[in-house]
């Protein structure tokens, strides 16, 4: 493995670990917000419920992305990071820069 490729892999590992930490922190914040006691006022409770639904949706999205990031880290450990999980072709660097946790090349993701 070339030193450039090793350097790139370490860069992706750092990016993925940072993203995982960000998602973990956000999910903890969402959980704390959802655990706050409801207001006694029924109008305020209706607004809070709408906010809670939005937070639950965000939390679900974050859980999915967190699983994708963990899978990408596992691919790094296994030596298969940057290889499309469908066709086996190399994922273009430009795509990995935009979506480092992607398991698919552009063609297979379409």
Image (cartoon, helix red, strand yellow):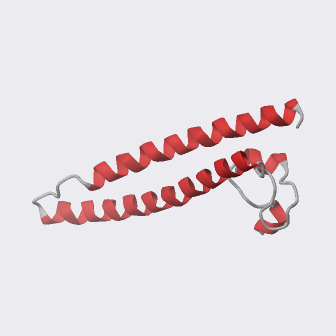
* Image location (x, y in percent) of residue 72: 67, 51
Relative to 91, 10 lies left or right: left
Residue drawn at x 61%, y 51% is 69
Q: Residue furthest front?
A: 78
Q: Residue furthest left?
A: 40
* Image location (x, y in percent) of residue 75: 71, 51
On-image quarter of the N terminus: top right
* Image location (x, y in percent) of residue 60: 46, 62
Relative to 45, 69 lies left or right: right
Residue drawn at x 73%, y 50% is 78
Relative to 46, 16 lies left or right: right
Q: Is residue 46 above or below residue 73?
A: below
* Image location (x, y in percent) of residue 82: 79, 51
Q: How many marks?
A: 0
Camera-nearest residue between 68 and 47: 68
Residue drawn at x 57%, y 38% is 18
Residue drawn at x 75%, y 44% is 97
**Res. 14 image quadrant:** top right
Q: Is residue 41 above or below residue 82?
A: below
On-image quarter of the C terminus: bottom right
């Amino acid at each position: 493995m070339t030193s450039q490729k090793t350097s790139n892999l370490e860069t992706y590992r750092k990016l993925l670990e940072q993203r995982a930490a960000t998602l973990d922190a956000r999910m903890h914040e969402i959980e704390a917000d959802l655990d706050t006691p409801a207001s006694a006022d029924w109008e305020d409770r209706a607004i809070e419920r709408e906010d809670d639904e939005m937070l639950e949706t965000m939390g679900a999205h974050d859980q999915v992305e967190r699983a994708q990031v963990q899978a990408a880290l596992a691919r790094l450990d296994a030596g298969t990071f940057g290889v499309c999980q469908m066709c086996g072709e190399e994922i273009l660097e430009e795509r990995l820069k935009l979506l480092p946790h992607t398991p698919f090349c552009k063609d297979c993701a379409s």
